[in-house]
Amino acid sequence: MNGRKIAFVPAMAVAVTVIAGSPALAASHAPAAPRVVYQEIRGINKHYVGTYSGDWTRCNYVTKASYTQSVNCSEGRTVSESISGSASFSAGSVSASIGFNVSYSTTVTAGNSVTIKPGGSGWFDVGFRYQQYTIDMEKRTCVSPGPCGSWSAPQKVTVQNHQGNTFHYFGTGAV
């Protein structure tokens, strides 16, 4: 009976040694290294389109009169930059690619006046000037550790950069 115990105990020890000491078996039971999936975003082909005025708000209406009028406009205007065609790109990623904050928003208040000749009439409005740009945005998916996929087809995004407020008289008879 003593022989059976000796023969039995070493067999258990060998089995434990094989499981714990075998590199192939130990590797198959080890937890997998965590894989991190993330996206890279870039802007290419930044293009200046031009400087424009727009987003007009009505300030004063000048009615026809038989005398010269001087009309003032002192109006606040909320300016919000815009992104069009942004698809699935965040304002932050577009801002980083274009070089200015495309989420900019503020209220500007200023004043100006216009002189209208007798018989003239129309709206005196406040708006803002902005520079417009287009940029092609691309993204790709990466796995770490591992390679990144191919860049997506470029998607054109149009943005505007606020330059300041402006006034415009939309009417007749301005001096």
Image (cartoon, rainbow, N blue to C red):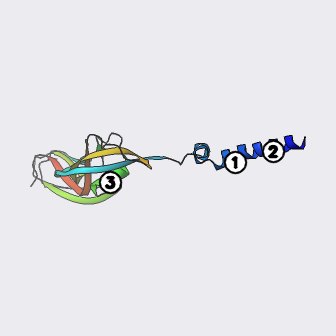
> What's the mark number on residue 17?
1
Q: Residues within 10 Å of mark 3 (few under 14, many from 20)?
A: some
Q: Which residue is mark 2?
A: 9
Mark closest to the chain's N terminus, 3 or 2: 2
Quadrant location of the N terminus in the rendered image: top right
> What's the mark number on residue 104?
none
Task: Tell me if residue 171 comes above or below residue 68 in the rendering.
Answer: above
Quarter holding residue 64:
top left
**Number of residue marks:** 3
Q: Which residue type carries mark 2?
A: Val
The reply to whether residue 165 is visible in this rendering is: yes
The reply to whether residue 56 is visible in this rendering is: no
2 with respect to 129 (left or right): right
Q: Which residue type carries mark 3?
A: Ser
In the depicted view, which residue is nearer to us: 94 or 170? 94
Mark closest to the chain's N terminus, 1 or 3: 1
In the depicted view, which residue is nearer to us: 119 or 81? 81
